[in-house]
Image (cartoon, coloured by chain):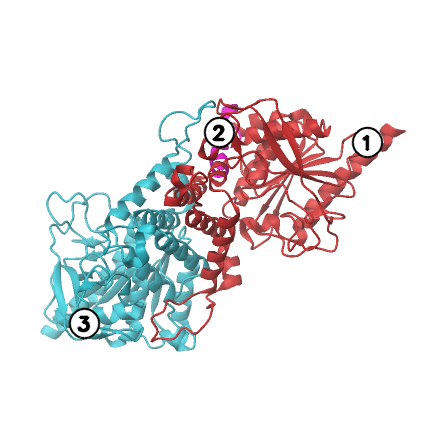
Chain colours: A cyan, B red
Amino acid sequence: MAEASTSSDNSIGIVKPQTAEFDEPLSLANGRSLARYQLLYETYGTLNKDASNGVLICHALSGNHHAAGLHSYDDPKPGWWDAYIGPGKAIDTNRFFVVSLNNLGGCDGSTGPTSINPASGEVWGPDFPSLRVRDWVHSQARLADRLGIARWAAVVGGSLGGMQAMRWALEYPERVNRCVAIASAMKLTAQNIAFNETARQAISRDPEFKDGHYQRSDTVPRSGLSVARMIGHITYLSGDGMGEKFGRQLRSGSFTQGQDEPVEFQVQSYLRYQGERFSDSFDANTYILMTRALDYFDLAREYQNDPVKAFSHAQCKFLVVSFTSDWRFAPARSREIADALMAANKEVSYAEIESDAGHDAFLLPNMRYQAVFGNYMAKLADEIETGEQEAGN
Amino acid sequence: MAEASTSSDNSIGIVKPQTAEFDEPLSLANGRSLARYQLLYETYGTLNKDASNGVLICHALSGNHHAAGLHSYDDPKPGWWDAYIGPGKAIDTNRFFVVSLNNLGGCDGSTGPTSINPASGEVWGPDFPSLRVRDWVHSQARLADRLGIARWAAVVGGSLGGMQAMRWALEYPERVNRCVAIASAMKLTAQNIAFNETARQAISRDPEFKDGHYQRSDTVPRSGLSVARMIGHITYLSGDGMGEKFGRQLRSGSFTQGQDEPVEFQVQSYLRYQGERFSDSFDANTYILMTRALDYFDLAREYQNDPVKAFSHAQCKFLVVSFTSDWRFAPARSREIADALMAANKEVSYAEIESDAGHDAFLLPNMRYQAVFGNYMAKLADEIETGEQEAGN
C-alpha cells in the first residue's frame, strides 16, 4: 500500500487513537468464538444529533485505524487515506463523523495474533482464530453500537475494505445508507489467490517463522515478510507506472562492461527498502490471517453463487470505483459488481478512473477520483443535513 | 516454464546428449575469463553437405539442452520444445540439423556454478563469473565452429532465448541467415526486473543459501527456490488462463462455515508442487546468474541506445512472434523489435498470436503459432535445399 507523502494544508490535525473493549463473546464464521477483544479506533469530525452522519472506514490488507491526520506535530506522515479524509476533502470531516478502526486480527492495537490469549496467558500467535470478512463486519457493528450509531451514513473501503463495505450492505441492510466499494471485487481471481499464497509461503518457509510461534522464541520472520511485501508491492503498482517511476535507472555507477559486481537498478533497492521497512512493522501471523480472509471472501457463495440474489438483500445505494491500470482488482471486477447491482435494481454509480498507479491508485491523489468521490459524499451530506433540519423543525 | 505433457507421434525418438570441451580461454563481458569449459548439447537431424541447414536453439531461463525427443523409451516426458522440433514439425528435423545446448552457467551439464573451479579445485558456487547474453553467444559460436557450421540457417529462441538470437544477429551478422525471436524483448521493463529481484531475494535470504556456498555445506536453499519458482510460474501464465484452469476450485472438502483448517484452493497446491519440483532440480546460483543476464540485457545500449542503429548491423531476416496474453514479454515489446527492424530496413515478419497461455504460450501447442512458425521455417528449408541443388549441379 502506498502512503500519502506529506501532510496537506487541510489536514484534520492531531488525532488520538481510542480503545473499545468488548466482553461479550463474538461468534466467528469458523465456529469458534472470541471471549473478549478490544478494537483500536480513531474518529474525525463530530457526530450529529441524530447520529446520522457516521462514516465507517474499512481498511485493506496492511492498513490500520490511522486513516487521517497526524499523531503528533512532528509526525512525519499522516494517516493512510489523508488525501481523502479531512476538512473539505472527499470525506469531509466538517460534515461527517468518521470512524476508522484497526480490524480484529490486526497488529496495530486491536486484538490479534500478537495479543495475549486469556485462556492460556500466552501470546495467541498462529492459534488466533482465522477470520472471515463477515467477522470483521460483526465486530464493527458492535463498535457502531458502542458509538451510538444505529445506521452508517456510509460504509467505505478500498480493496479488502470494499469487501467489508459490501458485506455490511448484506449483513446489516438496515444499518447502511451508502456503500462505497473502491478497487474491490466480489471474490479474488485464481491469480490473486496465487500471489497471496506465494507471499504466505515466503513467510511460513522462513525458519524464523517457527510455525507462527516466533514471538515465543523472540524472533521475527523478517526475510519472509520482506519478500511477501515485495511481491505485494509489485502487484499493487502497474507495469507502466513502475516503468515511468524507475525505468532501467541505475542506482549508482555505470553499466559498463568489465565489472563483476552486480549491477543495481533503482527498482531493486527501492523494493528491498519497502520490504525491510514492512518487516520491521507488520506482524507475520496478521499478514497470513488477512490474506486468507481476502482469499476466502466470496460475496455470493451463500446466495447460491448468484450476486444478483445476494445484492437483492441490500437496502443502500452504492458507489463503485475502479482504476484503469489496476490489474489485481481490475475494472472488470468492479463492473461485475455494478452489473449485479443494476440487475438487482439497486441504485449504483460506477466510475472507472484513468490512472497509471495500479491498485495503489485508490490511496493516491487523482483529480477525477477526488471529484467523483467528493461529489458523491457531498450529495450524501446535503441529504443528511436536510433531513436533520426537517427533523429539527 | 510449462512443458510438453506427452510425447507426440512424430517424436524425434531417443536422443543422447554430447559434450564439447573448450580449452581456449573465453573472455567474458565482465572482464574476467574462463580458462576452459564444457557445453552439453544435443543434435537432431542431419547436417547437409554444405553445412547450411543448421538451426541453433537458444534456451530460456530454466531451459536446457534437452529440447526435443526422449532420453529413454520409458522417459515420461519429452524435451521442452518437442511440440515444435521433430519430423514434420515447425523446426523439421527431416530438413534441418538442430543444435540445442545447455548454456554456460547452467546446471544441466554445461560448466556452471555447480562445476569445479580448476583454479581452486572447489565448486565455483557464487564465484562463477557473472555472464551476459553476449557471453553465451560467443560460447555458442565456438560450438558452431566445432560442429563445422560457419553460418546458421537460423538462430531461434523464446524469451531469454530470443535475446540470444537477436544478439547473434548483431555479434556475428555474417553467421546468421534467419533470426527468430519469440516472446522476447530488447530489454526488460522495471516490472520484470522487480519480479526477478524478488525471486533472487527469496533465494538469497534463505538461510540454506549460505551466500551461495550451499554445496560446500551440503544444503540446498529449497524454500527460496520454491518461492522464486512460484513467482515465476504465476507471471508466466495469464490471469485469464489461470482463472480458466483453476478458478476458485477447492482441493478437497467443502468451503463450509464452522471449520478452522485453512481452506485449500487447487491453485495453491498446484503452485506449491511446482515450487517443490523446481527446488529439487535447479541450481540456485544458476537461477541468480540467469535472471541477472536477463536484467542486464539491453540490445541497443552500446549503439547509443538506438535500436535502429543496433539492428542496422544485422544481415539476416527476422521472424518476431508474440502472444496476446503474455504480460511479462508483452506484444508491445515485440512490436518495438519489429518497428526498429523495419526502420533499419531489415526484412521482418511479425505475428501476434491469440493465446490465453501467457508467456508460456511460446512452449505450447497452438495452431496459428504452428502455422506461422512452420511456414516460415519451411520456406527457409526450401531456399536452402534449392541452393544446395544449384550448388550441386
Residue in view at x 29 percent, y 43 percent: A276
Q: Quadrant of residue B348 in the image?
A: top right
Same subunit under labels 1 and 2?
A: yes
Q: Nearer the viewer, mark 2 or mark 3?
A: 2
Chain at numbered mark 3: A
Task: Say what amino acid the circle numbered 3 marks.
Answer: Arg
The part of the chain drawn in magenta is B290-304
Dominant secondary-structure state across the stretch colored magenta: helix
Q: Nearer the viewer, mark 1 or mark 2?
A: 2
Q: Which residue is mark 2?
A: B129
Q: Which residue is mark 3?
A: A142
3D distance between C-alphas at marks 2 and 3? 62 Å
Q: Is residue B296 magenta?
A: yes
Element class at badge 2? loop
Same subunit under labels 2 and 3?
A: no
Element class at badge 1? loop
Relative height, residue A110 to residue A229 (above, below): below
Instruction: Residue A292: give x, y in percent of width and height.
Output: 35, 63
Element class at badge 3? helix
Within 10 Å of the Cα at label 3, are there few (<14), some (14-19), or many (20+) other Cα atoms? Answer: some
Q: Is residue B308 left or right of residue A116?
A: right
Q: Which residue is mark 1?
A: B49
* Viewer-proximal residue among A100 and A312: A100
Instruction: Residue A220: give x, y in percent of width and height.
Output: 27, 50
Same subunit under labels 1 and 3?
A: no
Q: Is residue A1 magenta?
A: no
| The residue positioned farthest toward the right in the image shown | B393
Q: Nearer the viewer, mark 1 or mark 3?
A: 1
Residue in view at x 19 percent, y 73 percent: A35
